[in-house]
Image (tube, coloured by chain):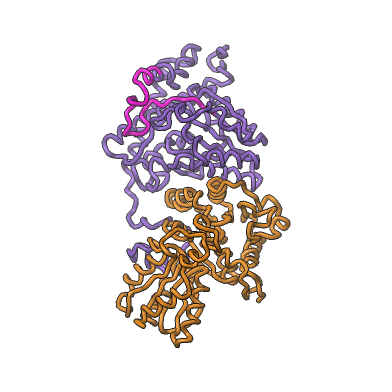
Chain colours: A orange, B purple
Amino acid sequence: MAELTYREALNAAMCQEMDRDDSVFLMGEEVAEYDGAYKVSRGMLERYGDRRVVDSPISELGFTGLCVGAAMAGLRPICEFMTFNFSILALDQVINSAAKMLYMTNGQVPVPIVFRGPTGAALQLSAQHSQACETYYVHSPGVKLVTPATPADAKGLLAAAIRDDDPVAVMEGELLYNVRGEVPDGEHVIPLGVADRKRAGNDVSIVTHGKMVHVALQAAATLAREEIEADVLDLRSIRPLDVDAILESVARTNRVVYLEEGWPFAGVGAQIVALIQDEAFDELDAPVVRVTQADVPMPYAKNLEQLAKPSVKAVVDACKRVLYL
Amino acid sequence: MAQGTGTATTRMVDGFTRDELHALLFDMILYRRFEEKAEEAYAIGKIGGFCHLHIGQEALAAGSIKPLREDDLVITAYREHTQAIAKGISPGAVMAELYGRADGCSGGRGGSMHLFDTTVGFWGGHGIVGGQIPLGAGLAWAIKYRGGDQICVCFMGDAAVNQGAFLEALNMSAIWHLPVIYVVENNGYGMGTAFSRVSATEMEARSGACGIPAHTVNGQDVVATHRFFAELAERVRAGAGPQFVNAVTYRFRGHSMSDPVSGTYRSKEEVDSAVEAQDPIKILRDRLMDTGLLTQEELETLDAEARAAIEGAAEFADASPLPDPSTLYDHVYAEINEHGRLFLDGRGSQGGSHG
């Protein structure tokens, strides 16, 4: 084990996979000479050369399509978005090309590609740079999505994403890049579709993903001071979804809060609520409550931004609500 | 035009032997008969959805694809039945795909707009205008990454050059010197909108901003088109970098099956005049007859062979079963592990219950 930042863990995963497979290459804006807009690819140009670490023009639709085409031909591109906000420009190639290619070719053309970069809000970046993009991706059959919350998960999930034969989006967080944590040395691969209980408790389940895991843990710590023990389930992988882990937690606590960074309408939480009422209705002692971003574009002013983001207090309040406290 | 000389077996037109010319004529007739059969099948409901015919543009399919190697890659838009056949997919597998049958080249999952057979280098069949252009750049990128000597030919309609994807892909192809030829099948209309109404510059000017050489070829002349692409393909293979070809052609039918041949956006006179003077099959036929390289009897034999091949294709499609309903969830994902659930439609055993 070594203590690494989340950023270093992502770098380690890319190097681990590029060392073992020449078909893996990294393309994106500022990934090579600049070492990555968030320095995630630091040193990789020097290590692998400009054949495999490639600065793209600012052409999200174009370079995403190029990477999808390269994946169709059997290469394994890591397509970096400076932020997933910019990938909205490229969604045609994600949804119409990458997600559907295997199906409409009747299995002839897999698309083993990784889309990665930060999603969601950082600090005062305002409306166009602060949205959680999970729904755009998981809405389409054919795409997989993982959302690592810790350095260890970042290394293991990114490695698994690169090895996977399908398009996998790896959604990171700008505010996570400096988070430090223990990361296994050597080869570390976490299978897609396995949730991780980040905290054990039997009173209420806080189910969440991505950087909201940290908000959930803070809320759980607050609740613990009132002798309420929350189960914090980090999905880690939204598609495939670890349904068994969700149902197990629901069966134990009978009370669920879903916490996510994005908007509520057709959000990830909406799917989780539908799933729980479909498959665990009788286990519930209270309706599931969702905590999300306010249903508004992200405002710039510090006070409004804080108001719009899901807060620790909102999670604590939601937990008390499902506990009828 | 160079006139033929010598005996019937050795005389040449523009460097082509009589047999080669007969083969090109046969290919174009085959494509014409295929599209006519598709038109007929559509009218009686055997083919559904959108269906875009290539009638009038057959010289481009034969002239640009036949000179390629089998391991060269072709990617294109959705008016692609004849291109698929030209690259080596059997007419039966294409027709079965149009019929939505299991033996279609995409297993009945793609239909008219999504024909694929990568074993012969045909990479689709893409339905979003311009969407295939960055994909074509990516196929070429993969060739270069692996140090291969294939080339990629990426077709598009004239309307596609107004998509951002076009400019982005051409720019990247130029900076990375990719082995790709971008071919505009310029039939003058994007659906019902004349190119001149949506472009302030001529087609040949559209690649210049990226530093990619532009060429124009008469896409109704299969001999000229074939000779041009044979030469250009070898130049690109030898490292000439990306090229842009404005292939001038004309569509004799409507944009799709629901679109009249003429009407609000182009006159009957314009279409009639093109059908009279610009039919690629007539152009080659007349040239061969004028130079004594084709008899009426030979023409009738070629046509009979083409008709028989297409009848066979239609019979193959008719006989092919519908896709097995149990395959509905196949090929959504290439890799399904024992963890987690990928399908969330609540249909359980039909795909939702693994893991």
Please identify the quarter of the rendering in which residue A185 is found: bottom right
From this view, report whether residue B331 is shown above or below residue B309.
Answer: below
Residue under the image location 39 percent in, 24 percent down:
B303
Residue under the image location 66 percent in, 62 percent down:
A15
In the displayed orientation, state which residue is furthest to the right: A46
- Report x, y in % for residue A320: 39, 80
Q: Is residue A209 visible?
A: yes
Please identify the quarter of the rendering in which residue B282 is found: top left
Q: Main secondary structure of the magenta part?
A: loop
Q: Which corner quadrant holds the N terminus of chain A?
A: bottom right
- Report x, y in % for residue B58: 45, 27
In the displayed orientation, state which residue is furthest to the bottom: A227
Residue under the image location 34 percent in, 50 percent down:
B323
Front one among A130 and A2: A130
Instruction: Answer left or right for A277 relative to A167.
Output: left
Q: Is residue B251 magenta?
A: yes
Q: Is residue A20 visible?
A: no
Front one among A53 and B164: B164
The range drawn in magenta is B246-273
From this view, report whether residue B73 is shown above or below residue A300.
Answer: above
From this view, report whether residue A288 is shown above or below residue B126.
Answer: below
- Report x, y in % for residue B322: 32, 48
From this view, report whether residue A112 is shown above or below residue B317.
Answer: below
Q: Which corner quadrant holds the C terminus of chain A?
A: bottom left
